Amino acid sequence: MKCAICGGHLEEKATKLEVWVDGKLLVIEDVPARVCENCGEKYFSAKVSKQIDKLLESKIKAERKLEVPIFSFKALEAIG
Ligand SMILES: [Zn+2]
């Protein structure tokens, strides 16, 4: 199996996945995926995709929380 975008080699890895749910950003760690060595595109198996859905629907408590700085591109206007 090769990367559908660039044709690069895919490597089996535990990845970090960012998902937006209802306007909130969630991060899931240790997600098994095939990652393109060239462009970094992630591919998840049907089984893993189902497990991700299950995790998101579950009421499992987050391991920890992360504070994320948010920037607006409009701030550039103030700098000139
Ligand atoms: Zn690629």
Image: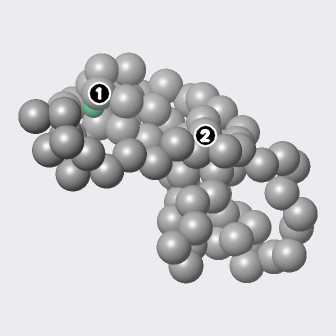
Residue 57 pos. (x, y %): 73, 79
Name the residue type under label 1.
Answer: Cys
Name which residue lies at 60% across and 29% down: 13
Looking at this view, is 60 or 39 the one in front?
Answer: 60
Q: Is residue 32 above or below residue 53?
A: above
Is ligand 1 closer than 8 angstroms to the Cβ of mark 1? yes
In the displayed structure image, the side of residue 15 where residue 51 appears, left or right:
right
Circle 2: element type? strand
Name which residue lies at 70% across and 71% down: 56
Q: How many marks?
A: 2
Quarter of the rendering containing residue 30? top right
Residue 48 pos. (x, y %): 63, 57
Residue at the disc numbered 1: 39
Identify the mark at residue 16; answer none if there is no mark: 2
Q: Quadrant of ligand 1?
A: top left
Q: How is the image coloured?
A: one colour
Name which residue lies at 29% across and 36% down: 3
- Nearer to us of marks 2 and 1 is 2
Name the residue type under label 2.
Answer: Lys
Identify the mark at residue 77; answer none if there is no mark: none
Q: Residue furthest left?
A: 80
Residue 61 pos. (x, y %): 89, 63
